[in-house]
Structures are given as structure tokens and as C-alpha cells.
Image (tube, grey):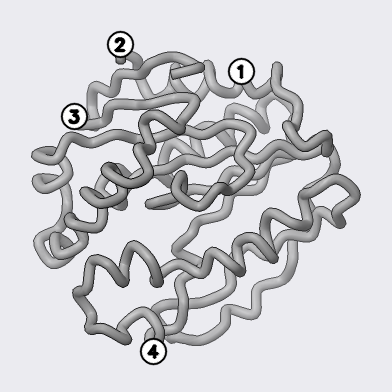
Amino acid sequence: MRFEPITWERLAEALADHVGTLEPADGGTRLRIGVDGPPAARPGVPAEQIAEALRARGRAVLTVSTEGFLRPASLRFEYGKEDPDAYADGWFDTGALWREVFRPLEPGGSGRVLPDLWDPVTDRATRSAYRVLPEGGVLILHGPLLLGHWFPFDLGIHLNLSPGALRRRTEEGERWTLPAFARYEDEAAPAERADVVVRADDPRHPAWTGVGA
């Protein structure tokens, strides 16, 4: 896999230009982009940069973080608070993401997306209002472990960290999650599934494969 140096700003602009050439794979009217990466890679940052670049081009954009779709603590911590397999398999409410985010964007769907469902701090439902993504709009979902659930992304972007960089950039109290990301690499092979791979070992100097990795 060949990487070329790029800045985050140029990356966002290039991807926004590419999005302008895409059509939804399911024949619908709304595009779905996934920005996949561990918390250490801060996937929400490029997701917002891409969103701003798209808005500057006149596109309606809705960004959604998987952090708003964590399952209740009683389910997340069923096997303890530091179980990497539970983190990989049971922390994120993928069923709710399908129901509240992706299905409304299917052909003939209402476009009414729930931006978040659960507040992990209060461990209660957020009660957020639905937001309507109009026809021609773009959803950007960002978070970890996204490319192993067969979500219907029209463009998948994977932020890649080497094992050493992932360990260095992961906060000490969160390093128990590292085996979950090693398993994700082995089982899901996100770099192979993604349309775009961004090497982010040094956050100041990213490099990318271009579109169609």
C-alpha cells in the first residue's frame, strides 16, 4: 500500500471533491461516509473538517459520533470495566445505529436521524431531538471499529495507527482496549475494506493512499 504525504486540510478538500462525484450505492439520495479510527487517532477531527469542506460546497451534512451510541453501563461492564472483548463486541449499540441512523437514509426513508441515544456520563438516554438530513445530504459517522459491521458506507475512511503509535497515543488508563484493536485488525482488516486509508502515526504529518485504496 503506497502512501503520499498530505495535510489534514488538503485531505478534507480532496475528499469533499471526491464526494461530489459519488452516488449512493443503494440508489437512494443521501450519501453515508464512515471515518473509522481508534480514539487515539481522533476520528472526529477529520470528520468535522470534511463536513465543513462539504458545507462550503453547498451540501447539507450531519455528523454523528458512535460515542453517542454506547450501550448502558450495565451491559458494557457485564464482564468488568476493562474487558477488551466486551469493548469490541458489546460497547457500541450497533442495532440502534442501524435503526436510528442508517435505515432512515435508505431509499424512501424519512431522513430523520437520531444524532445520539445514550449519555455515558449520566448513563441515561440523551432524549435528543431527531434531525432531518434532506435529500442530497451527507451523513458522516465517526468512531472506532466501524468497518467490521457491514454498515452501508458509500465512502469508508480508515485512520491507521501502527501498534507502537497506537500504544503511545492511547491514554494509559485506556490501554486495556489495545487487544480489541489488534483483534479488529486481524478479523476485520479495515485497511483492506476502506476506500481511503490515512496513516496517522504522526498527527502533524499524515499520509494517505488516495481514493480507492
Relative depth, front residue between 147 and 111: 147
Q: CA distance from mark 2 to mark 3?
A: 17 Å
Q: Earlier in the sequence, mark 3 or mark 1?
A: 1
Question: Secondary structure beneath disc 3?
Answer: loop
User: How far across and how far down the image is residue 115, in percent?
Assistant: 63, 62
Given residues 76 and 44, the one toward you in this image is 76
Q: Mark 2 Cα within 10 Å, few/some/many (few <14, many 20+)?
A: few
Question: Please, what is the three-letter code of the amino acid marked with disc 2?
Answer: Arg
Gap between marks 2 and 4 measured at Cα = 44 Å
The label number, if any, that marks residue 202 in the structure image:
3
The residues tagged by marks 3 and 1 sit, at their Cα atoms, a distance apart of: 25 Å
In the picture, measured across the screen, residue 167 lies left or right of residue 196, that is left
For label 2, the residue is 2
Task: Name the mark nearer the viewer: 3 or 4.
Answer: 4
Per the rendering, the mark at residue 74 is 4
The residue tagged with tag 2: helix, strand or loop? loop
Of callouts 2 and 4, the N-terminal one: 2
- Residue at (26%, 30%) from the top-left corner? 200
Total residue callouts: 4
Image marks 2 and 4: residues in contact by CB distance under 8 Å: no
- Dividing the picture into quadrants, the one containing residue 126 is bottom right
User: How far across and down, in percent of the image, does residue 39 sit?
Assistant: 30, 52
Q: Secondary structure at mark 4?
A: helix
Residue 156 drawn above or below residue 129: above
In this rendering, the answer to whether 166 lies above or below 90 is above
**Within 10 Å of the Cα at label 4, are there few (<14), some (14-19), or many (20+) other Cα atoms?**
few
* Quadrant where the image shows the C terminus: top left
